[in-house]
Image (cartoon, rainbow, N blue to C red):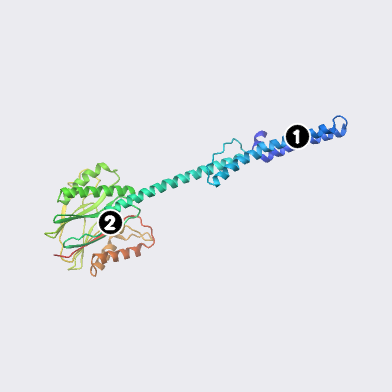
Amino acid sequence: MMLNYLRQSIGRRLFLSLVFFSAIIIGSVYFLWDNPLSFPLSYSLIGVGLLLLIFIVILFNFVAWPLKKVVLQMKRLLTGRSYKNIYSNRIDEIGIIAQFFNKTTASIEEISGKLREQKRMSSELEIASSIQANILPSGNPKIPGLEIVAKLVPAAEVGGDSYDFIQKDNHTFFYIGDVTGHGAPAALVMMMVNTLLHTYAEIYDSTYDIIVNTNRQLKPRIKSAMFMTMLMMKWDHINEKLTYVGAGHEHILVFRAATGKLDSYVTGGVALGMVPDNSKLVKDQQIPLEKGDVVVLYTDGITEAKNDKGEMFELERLKEAVKRYAVQYGPEGIVHHIATEFSSYVGEMEQADDITLMIMQYTGK
């Protein structure tokens, strides 16, 4: 126990060594004082010198040299050069310094690794964001009889909201969708769906067939917890007829220019990726339009956004905004003023979900 007590402190060992050598020297002096002729003075001085030399060697081996090795590795760390861990079974101050150095460098290496990983992920997210940006329409389409404006604001570098326009012969398909969550996983599902929709739009003229076949291909390729709500519409250029198929998405809001009233359509259906076969759960429906009517599509990033009091923007507030601005403005103005009102409502609150708003107006032939 006494040995362990001494091993815990350099000072204690040095003090004990100093006491030991001092006792020998004092004892020697006392002995020579009483027996001045027993040993020549030169022998006595040599003996004292040897004792001091032994003490210096002990001091160097136990303190100076180990401390020098620790300081050397610290200097290498501070100057950015390669360094080594310090292995020591000592439990005194030098052992503690060595352990502290090892733990500090391990933490630095861990942080450096995380920074490298974050840099790599950031680079990959930039690429994914670029790919997603190229998938989204670069502008608003020119569609006979309709004026359309759409805006999307992702909550992260990449998101799960999407919209697109697919023009084919005498009709145009357009959709708005929202994948569960946001970020990279949602963006991957979004890009898969976008590719499938474009592929099947080349094959089928029916919105119903496009949605059913897209779901059939999507379901086995994504996790069970992931799905995408969607609303896909078809505009017939010749007959000027608007039809849609809902897949568990938000309401369709239609402002009637003639009466100033706002109709709300439940889209119905079930989200893509929830069931293997949705053919009996979705259906093609029509929305009758008169000149000047405004159709509003949105994702829940708008209605579920909260202000600093935790209050959601909600559907009713969006409805009131549509009625207020649709009387005075076209799609561009409506989008602008709703966005302004929305920003004022949520204030400085961090955006929690992707936000998409699409507004179209029937302009007539």
Q: Note whether 56 is above or below 129 in the view shown.
A: above
Residue 103 appears in the picture as rendered: yes
User: The residue tagged with tag 2: helix, strand or loop?
Assistant: loop
Coordinates of residue 163 in the picture (x, y in percent): 25, 55
Please provide percent x and percent y for residue 277: 20, 44
> Horizontal and vertical percent for residue 150?
26, 60
Number of the front mark, 2 or 1: 1
- From mark 2 to mark 1, how far is it between C-alphas? 88 Å
Res 95 quadrant in image: top right
Residue carrying label 1: 51
The amino acid sitting under disc 1 is: Leu
Q: Can you see residue 271?
A: no
Determine whether, in the image, residue 144 is placed left or right of residue 322: left
Residue nearest the observer in this picture, 16 or 204: 204
* Quarter of the rendering containing residue 239: bottom left
Residue at image mark 2: 299
299 over 45 or under it: above or below? below
| Amino acid type shown at disc 2 | Thr
State which quarter of the image contains the C terminus.
bottom left
Q: Which mark is residue 360?
A: none
* Disc 2 packing (10 Å; few <14; some 14–19; many ≥20): many
Residue farthest to the top?
38
- Identify the mark nearer the N-term, 2 or 1: 1
